[in-house]
Structures are given as C-alpha cells and as structure tokens.
Amino acid sequence: MPRLDQDTKDDKSTEHVPTEATAEEVDGAIGGLDALDAPNAGPQRSRARRIGAAVLPPIGAAILFVAVWQAVWATAWLPEHQLPSPGTIAEVFWGLVETGQVWEFLWTSVHRAVIGFVIALGIATPLGLLLARVKLVRAAIGPLVSGLQSLPSVAWVPAAVIWFGLTDTTIYMVVLLGAVPSIANGLVAGIDQIPPILPRVGKVMGAGTFANARHILLPAALPGYLAGMKQGWAFSWRSLMAAELIASSPELGDGLGQFLHNGMSLFDMPMVITGIMLILFVGVGIELLVFAPVEKITLNARGLRKN
C-alpha cells in the first residue's frame, strides 16, 4: 500500500511538467503575435471599394441636401430674394466659370491662405517645441498661446488695418494670429503624449537638442502635430475670409471674401450663397485631398487605424 501511494505521487509530480517547445512552435507563436500587431492584419478591400466608400457617402449627402433645398424652395416658404433655387445658384456659378472670374477668386484667396499657413507653420513649430520642452517658457506664455487660440481672429482685423492699412500685410497678419496658436498647441499636445523614455534614449545615444527634436520628438508627436495643423489650416482659412470681408479694397484684389462682401452690398442672395459654396468647396477639398490622406498614412503606419 505505501508503494502504491508513492507511485501515485510520482505520477502526479510528473503530470504537469512542461515539455520543451520545438522551434516550429516558437516560430508559429511569434508569427501569430506579429500578425496581431501588424496594422494591416485585417482583410484588404479592393481599390474600387475603398474609393467608393470614400466618395459615395459625400455625394449622396450632397444630393440629399440639394433635394431638400429644392423642396423647401418649391413650398415658397421664403421669398425668392431670400432663398433662391439651386438652379439659380448653378446659373450664377456657371456665369463665373464662363467669364473666368471664379479662378481669379479662388487663386487670390487660396494662395494667400497657403502662404500664410506655411509661414505660420514655420513660426508655430519652434514655438511648440519650446513650450513643450522648456518649463519656464510654458509657464510664462503657455496660457497666452491658449488664450489666443480661443480669441476670434476677426477681432484682429480692425487693429491690423490700423497698423498696416489695406495691404496684404494686414491679411497675412490676421491669418498668422489665427493659425499659429492652434499649430503650436497641437504640437505641445503631441509631445506631452510621448513616453519619457524616448527623449532620454536620444540623449544617451548622443543626440543634441536639434537632432532630438528632428528625429525623436517631431516623428513621435506626429499624430497630435497633424491634428494641430488641420485645426491651424481651418483657423487660417476662416481668418482669411474674415479679413477679406472686412478689409475689402480694390488694392487687395478680388478674393472669395471680397466676392461675398459684394453680394452682401448688392443684397444679391444668389451671389452670397455662391460665395459661401465656393468657400465651403475649398475647405472640403483641402481636407479630402491633403489632410485626410496624410492622416490616414500616419495612423496606418502606427497601427492606429483600420483600412
């Protein structure tokens, strides 16, 4: 009987002893983990389906909006001079295309916005790095930068007109004051989310201040930095329209804001709605053609977004 108990204990003691894993099992386990970690692990959709998924919903929403607009116009709920039909707006727009004025309006406004945004990016990037990495600078002007972001940019137009007159400098000044705080705060938010170990590793490997910012901070903070750039572009575009609306002058050329101002002065609702549509068209176009692809590539590269 004692011999039987001893044999039973020996069997139990060896029952759960793990066996050594084979090389194939280890490789399979590592491959499974890599597949889970890979950003493109899910099934891939065809190119046509991806394009359709991106294009068809906005087109459908636009068609629905125009249909509702036409239905409201048909009820004569508002007089024609307050709510023109979609057909009337199309006629005004086509007239601008035939005369070539629409390209002049778009070029004047878009090239100002792009130049102002590039200058704002050059100012906001080092400012954001200073705010994120130097505690004294952040404590001194951090609240001011955040406050400037919440200040409506249209408030700067009267002051800029007094300072610089009805010139392009006034326009660019308003655009910069609208865009710089948003870009800087976006970069600060992105750097704040970086694990502290990354900058330390850069210092250990001999990276100086400039190399650390270029090769570690900016790439690691790219999602937040990109969000700040998107918001900065939106603010710069809105600031530009406000400046062109208020600081209207033949010396400044004919932009979309000037066209909208002329429609208001003439009490011409089709002109006003056409101007609004053109401004919206530019905003949506820049988002879809520039920022959305860059954001998708950035997030996919980090495995943060499904295809």
Image (spheres, grey):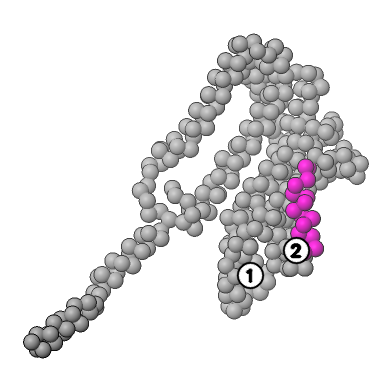
Residue 151 lies in quadrant: top right
> Which residue does the image show at 47% across and 51% down from the upper left?
305
What's the residue at 44%, 35% (across, down)? 52
Q: Main secondary structure of the magenta part?
A: helix
According to the picture, the residue beneath numbered tag 1 turns out to be 212
Mark 1 vs 2: CB contact within 8 A? no
Q: Nearer the viewer, residue 202 or 210?
A: 202
Q: CA distance from mark 1 to mark 2?
A: 19 Å
* Residue neighbourhood size for the residue with mark 2, other residues' Cα within 10 Å, grouped as few (<14), some (14–19), many (≥20): some
Residue 181 vertical placement versus 215 (above, below): above
Please provide percent x and percent y for residue 182: 70, 50
Q: Do we see residue 136 in this rendering?
A: yes
Would residue 141 appear left or right of 278 to someone viewing this image?
Answer: right
Give me the residue at 37% from left, 51% from top. Answer: 42
**Is residue 278 located in the magenta-colored stretch of the structure?**
no
Check disc 2 and report its element: helix, strand or loop: helix
Provide the residue span drawn in magenta: 138-153
Q: Which residue is at 75% across, 39% downward?
A: 240
- Quadrant of res 192: bottom right
The circle drawn on residue 288 is: none
Residue 124, image x, y percentages: 72, 56
Q: Is residue 92 left or right of residue 243?
A: left
Q: Amino acid at mark 1?
A: Asn
Q: Residues within 10 Å of mark 1 (few under 14, many from 20)?
A: some
Q: Quadrant of the N terminus?
A: bottom left
Type of residue at label 2?
Arg
Instruction: Give the mark count.
Output: 2
Mark closer to the chain start, 1 or 2: 2
Picture coordinates of residue 143, whole percent (x, y): 77, 57
Would you place residue 13 above or below residue 150 in this image?
below
What number is the disc on residue 138?
2
